[in-house]
Each structure stands twice: as structure tokens, then as C-alpha cells.
């Protein structure tokens, strides 16, 4: 199982990054979100997912844990394969995807391999239910920290919390990241600012 790759980017196309590690070039299917900041000749780091089929073994790579978590959520939906997952995530950032599914908005792109309007609707329906389950996890975690309430978990803050956990963060991490932010901000802005805080801590 290949968990990640670190090496020099030797080639890239619209949906492919070739990372050379110790003289071996690994071809990773990826998203435009991951590819856009990468430059040929520079060192890159990709988190990977290996898809094994009877007729092929393919490696898929993304640039951050949030995007990998979104990819795994998509793969949990019946009928959605890695190529379709990457096509969807090429059309939207991880925070936007995390907000789209739990809110039940039909904003998923319907162009790309394996993506139809019917598939997009099924993704929204199934992931909305899964995000509802995560809200329960967030609540129990939040109650454990009521001695130090960081942010009221209502309105935009609650939706931002759901989005952050969809990206793979715990309820505790999400609450701390949202602490001090203006809860009247739009959900997308809250998520964006929270992600900045989390990145600065790492």
C-alpha cells in the first residue's frame, strides 16, 4: 500500500502528475485543485490512494488530507469510482464540497467520467445522510468541551463545523479553529478562516 509520495515532479498534464522517487516515476491521477500550484522540476508531496482492479492498478494522488478525505467520502457512495471522485473534486475545492453535501445543494459538477445528474443526486443524498451522522459525533465531542465553549454551535458556525469534520478534522479541532471567529460570517468564509488557523498551527 502506497500511502504517500515525495519527490520531484517530472511531468504533469490536465489530470496526471508524475513524481520521481529514487529514480522511479510514479504516475498519479489527480485533480486540477492539486495540480494548479505544482511546478515541474520542484519537489512535491502527494497523499495517495491505490485502486486495484482485475485489469489495472492505478495510483491517485492529492495534495492535502482534506482533499483525500473528500475523495474517500465520494468513494463510499455506491457506483462512484476514483476517476469520478477526482473529476468532481477538480470542479470544486474541498471546503466547497464539504459544504455542498451536508446542505443538500445540487451543485456537484456533472461533467466527467462516471458523473451524471442521477449520480450527482445520489451522491448528495447519501453524503447528506452521512454528514447527519457526523453531526451526532460533533455534538458529543462538543458537549465534552462545554467547560470551555469556544463558539456557539448554531447557525453558520454549526454548518462550518460540519464542513470541517467532513474534511477530516475532529469536533474538538473544528471548535478550536472556529474560536474567535465572527459567527455572523458566511459559512464559506468561516471554513476558509478556520482552515487558515489550522494550517498555521501545523
Image (tube, rainbow, N blue to C red):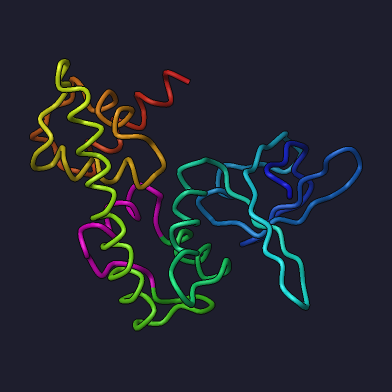
Q: Residue at x 70, y 56 (%)?
A: 28
Whether 108 is among the magenta residues is yes
Name the quadrant containing residue 8. top right
Counting every numbered tag in the picture gives 0
Q: Is residue 100 left or right of residue 28?
A: left
Q: Residue at x 68, y 37 (%)?
A: 44
Of 162 and 89, which appears nearest the observer? 162
Name the quadrant containing residue 46. top right
Q: Residue at x 17, y 16 (%)?
A: 148
Seen in the picture, residue 202 relative to 68 is either above or below; the reply is: above
Q: Residue at x 41, y 41 (%)?
A: 168
In the rendered image, residue 85, in percent from the top left (x then y), is placed at 50, 65
Whether 35 is among the magenta residues is no
In the rendered image, residue 4, in percent from the top left (x then y), is placed at 68, 42
Of 72 and 8, which appears nearest the observer? 72
Residue stretch rendered in magenta on the structure: 92-109
Of 41 and 182, which appears nearest the observer? 182
Farthest right residue in view: 23
Seen in the picture, residue 31 relative to 190 is either above or below; the reply is: below
Of 189 and 167, which appears nearest the observer? 167
Q: Is residue 114 left or right of residue 103?
A: right
In the rendered image, residue 26, in percent from the top left (x then y), is placed at 79, 52
Q: Is residue 197 left or right of residue 189?
A: right
Q: Is residue 145 left or right of residue 43?
A: left
Amino acid at each position: 500500500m502506497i500511502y504517500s509520495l515525495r519527490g520531484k515532479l517530472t511531468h504533469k498534464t490536465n489530470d496526471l502528475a508524475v513524481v520521481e522517487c529514487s529514480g522511479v516515476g510514479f504516475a498519479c491521477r489527480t485533480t486540477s485543485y492539486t495540480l494548479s500550484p505544482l511546478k515541474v522540476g520542484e519537489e512535491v508531496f502527494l497523499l495517495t490512494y491505490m485502486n486495484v482492479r482485475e485489469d489495472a492498478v492505478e495510483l491517485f494522488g492529492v495534495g492535502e488530507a482534506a482533499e483525500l478525505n473528500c475523495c474517500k467520502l465520494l468513494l463510499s457512495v455506491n457506483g462512484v469510482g476514483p476517476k469520478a471522485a477526482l473529476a468532481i473534486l477538480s470542479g470544486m475545492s474541498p471546503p466547497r464540497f464539504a459544504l455542498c453535501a451536508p446542505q443538500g445543494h445540487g451543485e456537484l459538477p456533472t461533467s466527467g467520467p462516471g458523473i451524471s445528474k442521477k449520480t450527482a443526486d445520489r451522491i448528495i443524498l447519501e453524503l447528506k445522510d452521512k454528514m447527519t451522522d457526523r453531526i451526532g459525533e460533533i455534538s458529543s465531542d462538543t458537549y465534552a468541551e462545554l467547560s470551555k465553549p469556544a463558539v456557539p454551535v448554531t447557525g453558520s458556525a454549526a454548518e462550518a463545523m460540519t464542513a470541517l469534520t467532513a474534511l477530516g478534522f475532529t469536533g474538538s479541532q473544528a471548535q478550536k479553529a472556529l474560536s474567535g471567529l465572527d459567527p455572523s460570517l458566511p459559512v464559506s468564509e468561516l471554513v476558509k478562516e478556520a482552515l487558515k488557523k489550522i494550517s498555521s498551527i501545523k
